[in-house]
Image (cartoon, helix red, strand yellow):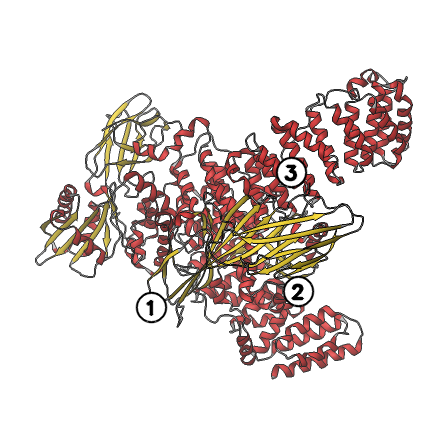
Amino acid sequence: MLLLLHWFGQYSCCLAGCIVSLHVDPVICEAHTGVLYTELSPQECLPSLVLIPTRPRLFSVCRNEDLKEMLESSKESLKLEAMKRIVGLIAKGKNASELFPAVVKNVASKNIELKKLVYVYLVRYAEEQQDLALLSISTFQRALKDPNQFIRASALRVLSSIRVPIIVPIMMLAIKEAAADLSPYVRKTSAHAIQKLFSLDADQKEQLIEVIEKLLKDKSTLVAGSVVMAFEEVCPDRIDLIHKNYRKLCNLLVDVEEWGQVVIISMLTRYARTQFTSPWKENNEKAFYESDSEEKKGHTEEKPYIMDPDHRLLLRNTKPLLQSRNTAVVMSVAQLYWHLAPKHEVSIVTKSLVRLLRSHREVQYIVLQNIATMSIQRKGMFEPFMKSFYVRSTDATHIKTLKLEILTNLANEANISTILREFQTYVKSQDKAFAAATIQAIGRCATNISEVTDTCLNGLVLLLSNRDETVVAESVVVIKKLLQTQPTQHSEIIKHMAKLFDNITVPMARASILWLIGEYCERVPKIAPDVLRKMAKSFTAEEDIVKLQTVNLAAKLYLTNSKQTKLLTQYILNLGKYDQNYDIRDRTRFIRQLIVPSEKSGALNKYARRILLAPKPAPVLESSFKDRDRFQLGTLSHSLNSKATGYQELSDWPAVAPDQSVRNVEIIEASGSDSEEESSESEKTSSDSGKSSSGSEQSSSESELEQKKKKKTKKVPQKKSKPTAADRYSEIPAVYRCVCLLEGPVTTSSFGPVKTYELLHHMTGKGLAAKYHFPRQPCLYQPSMVAVQVILSNSSDHSLEEIHIGDRSPASLSIHCFNTIERLEPEASVTVSMGIDFSDSTQAANFQLCTKEDQFSVSIQPAVGELLMPSSMTEQDFCKEQGKLQGMNETSATITMETANASSQAISKQVLSVANVGVVSSSQNNFSRFAGRTVSSGALVLVSLELKESSTALLTINTEKTVMASMLLRDIKQALTQA
Amino acid sequence: MIHSLFLINHSGDIFLEKHWKSVISRSVCDYFFEVKEKAVDPENVPPVLQTPHHYLISIYRGKLFFLSVVQTEVPPLFVIEFLHRVADTFQDYFGECSEGVIKDNLVTVYELLEEMLDNGFPLATESNVLKEMIRPPNILRSVVNTLTGGSNVGDTLPTGQLSNVPWRRAGVKYTNNEAYFDVVEEIDAILDKSGTTVFAEIQGVVEACVRLTGMPDLTLSFMNPRLLDDMSFHPCVRFKRWESERVLSFIPPDGNFTLMTYHVSSQNLVAIPVYVKQNINFFETGSCGRLDITIGPKQNMGKTVEGLMVTIHMPKVVLSANLTATQGNYTYDLTTKVLVWDIGKLNPQKLPNLRGSLSMQAGAPKPEENPSLNIDLKIQQLAISGLKVSRLDMYGEKYKPFKGVKYLTKAGKFQRLSLSFL
């Protein structure tokens, strides 16, 4: 009721306005009553029609005052109502800046909706009312400290959206703080704020880059997309910031929200083009095709090109996104494959692109544009889907034209007859612009495929008798071009066209015929002068383009047949001399001097014939998409075919790959801190990990499959009944686990200092020294391999060249070598990583470490504990699995330990120092359990330790691999008793 | 990325503007209007335009233009996809996406746009998340709100954005737990003059309506997943399970959503459910023509064809049509020159027929090309590709949900090219 009363008040107020003036402004009245309409019944609304005659300015003053009053009232509902109306005004683009003081007072309101609407207003007008806007800042500063993450985030959002330069320092501070916030949502908001601050004050760049660098390290999928966006906006050239985060971004990709995926993929495309070598060299084709299986075989064959595993990682992890429902994501993966993948792999994107053609018209438009560019270079990709590009009568014109373009690009000897048949129907289309485009397309097919040139030409000549003018005109133009490419005996066609000349009115077509007759006037000696005679009659009434060609025709005839045409030519030249168009006057003057011998005309006169009747090169009928490939596919620039602001060029592949070790992340350090290891169930990470594991199933699918196919190992049956996070986790292949380790949800294995072993002493190695250790990270190259990091150092006084791995024994040994090190300076050292498949045995891997001059036989003998990978499982699962591995598969021993070392932490530490296994959280204090899988075959290895009285303990190992069990038992026993 | 958004109606009025960065004058739309004037049909306006300082990316939906202004390089599909997502959200909230409802719900629309983008970068586009922050309007609530001064902005803060399943909100509760799946297939076909298939394919979509309590984990399996050739999934679907086992495993969003879209592999022959006999003639003299169309059942797997409708875009010279239909009724729109024959259910015993004469503009030459027929139809309880859902399992929750699957076949872009007079 209160509202109603209020409305009446307003009504009388407005009525006062209408007495003053009789001006009509229906728009404002509509705006005014529209809001009220929801609350009032139709009868009550009726009086509002009376309000129509009002002067706008007075009216708005009156209304504003009214709104002010409402805002200042103590009733929340009235304030809200006023704010709704004000937002309505903003939405309509009306000015509501006068109300700023009244609105800004409500910024600290408790009502969430009211507050949100005030925010909307503030963001819109703060720029105009900077001083007043400052009043609200303290509210936001307070909110930034709120315990609720959403309130912190929204405060930062609004604070950073207020474009007031004075508060730049405050914004900077807020961003820095938010970037370190515990909530990933707030961190995401800070990433957005970075861009806003940058656009407000570009001088803050350096400081902002620091924040970006920090946020890039963030492991939350929520942040990844936004921070990469900020990176792209603020410092897209700082590619060095990406190195360390490259693998993480690749692995997180599937779990990032759709919009972030697009941004990350396009950034990674640019990154990859600067960091990897080209996979496109012809002789490399085969190498890649088998790259996976060859890696397994152990690189026994010589290969000129090996794809960087990181390059492969990117391709593998983006592939599942082709199945995204978001068309932008699919397109960005397609462009990534186009720009980065080996040629034969690009075709996997075809199907997905064709699928997008089912989407909205605007999506079709962009996708077709990209397909048009792709189809020029790679016909084969889209040829099987030719029918998807058939034009439908309901398509929009720009879609039709693009489809036509693609069909023309796809035409070859084999399918041309089908395409031409299809084109025949298009020519008859009611959409005449489209019919004309089809004729152009036929012309292009005719020049490109010589087999059908004659057929096309005949077909086009038939079209000359078409009733529609545009069709005829276009045919003439195309025939002209075709005849030019084939100037043999086509005088019949020229004669035919000369006959049609009278009926054709389209200037371009008339001009084309005139040009043709002029060019081949010697083939039609009788007709040409007659045509010129007709033209002389109608010259003044013609279009400019026709006049120019008439002058040309006259000149050419004058030179070849001056007897018959001299007078006509002079007449036409006289007409042209006084034409209104300066081009025509100019041309006439030039032609006259050129052809008519006189005193003034100089030496050129002699060459007139050679100038005018020179054989001319035939025009090349090309696709209009020919030069679009200079732009990255899927970009705005590609769509517009001109460089858009802020377009980043895609660099060419480097000839030599930059150092690939820059992307190595030191996992040991990252996960080494005790706090992170133990916080396996900490609240913050658990949500992330749950998500990443669900998504990782997607990312890993491919590698999983490959793995299965190749190895045909019997997988331990996974129960499907309750796919808990942990359950799914065990299915994650090595590559992904690496990241999970980083995230910290799984208890990682690497405790304490890593043992380093000597591979080659510098004395034996003539200055080359090598040490190795097991980083205990999953091997990127092949899940069945154990990762080994080798530190090569040069202690001689000269530089060593071409350090690489030579012969190996046993010959079947599968090693993923590091890339040859071209040069190692004295005193320098380099860390390289390699992968060795030990096939679950402790047999040493022998190979030769070669330099340019020498070869040194070395061997790596793994401790049995390094042949394992940690496996994560629940206590129940552990017991269940243990139950299956009884009897033969169980080995146990009783050991005595010092009481000081009997705490579960100390035990874990000792066990993990020996074996790369994962801790299973235990509910019983006297039990410690560890689970792992062998790297090569994936067999479960379960270690359990039961503490008994008087420092004795029962150590049990359950695994199918009995040999490993006994060796492991010995190692663990030794470690526990010694300590 | 996205700088501003303008909503423009059919007649070219800007009725809503929203800026995410500094304000851009609406005069920027003049470039768009210029192009729009030139294009005969609003559908023919190119989606990407360049102006001296800005780039305009627009979509046309529900007789409205969504015109966004961008200033720097951005993947155009990114913007287009987002604009469609905005339109979808309006549709979801207000039941339709038209000028009227947007004007009626201006404040809600504005609040939605505010949440969906931050600084031009998409923030929350999942319908589940948005609905937690801004409640969709309904009559009862608007009455209650007026009386109590309540609001349609959620009191609680959204949980979805932070949960490990961002597409589903936490704490969903229903008394009746139900999950419905609609398998809808569309036949796209072009038949040539003689009635032989030039091109035919089946596109399908699995729409879901899931109202289940808690965090259910569903597994949907098909009898014959091999039929599926290419598909795209809702982000909730675990791609890996699909790759290895060909089952759809997912934690569903709450409410209605599109689970997957698919394309049936082209090796399979596509059954064409109806045949069309047609005869359209225009006579050289007398400025009239004759039309005779009969439709009969072909391969419809023993199901009834319903909702049969024939649409013909007549040449411009056809002034009126004087026809008789044995079944259903026809309309001829004089301005758009579209003849629509709404038949309804197809009775195999008595085939529907439409015949009569067409009168043409006097003196005009007879049309060169005969018009093509677009056919619309529906077959209930049938997925024409033969795809069948075999079972739906639920894990993670204790209760027994009610499960239902519905099949429907529709004609997508079904076109019959006409017999030419040549």
Above-or-below relation of B133 to A820: below
Residue at figure coordinates x 68%, y 82% from the top left: A9
Name the side, left or right, on which A256 lies relative to A871. Answer: right
Say which mark, if any, is on residue B399: 1
Query: Where residue A88 sits in the image (x, y, percent)?
Result: 63, 68
- In this view, the mark in front (1 or 2): 1
Name the side, left or right, on which A178 lies relative to B331. Answer: left
Query: Where residue A902 sits in the image (x, y, percent)?
Result: 15, 55
- The chain ID associated with circle 2 is A
Q: CA distance from mark 1 to mark 2?
A: 50 Å
Q: Amino acid at mark 1?
A: Tyr
State the residue position of label 2. A92
Q: Are marks 1 and 3 in contact (CB under 8 Å)?
A: no
Q: CA distance from mark 1 to mark 3?
A: 62 Å
| Helix, strand or loop status at disc 2 | loop
Query: Where residue A318 sits in the image (x, y, percent)?
Result: 43, 45
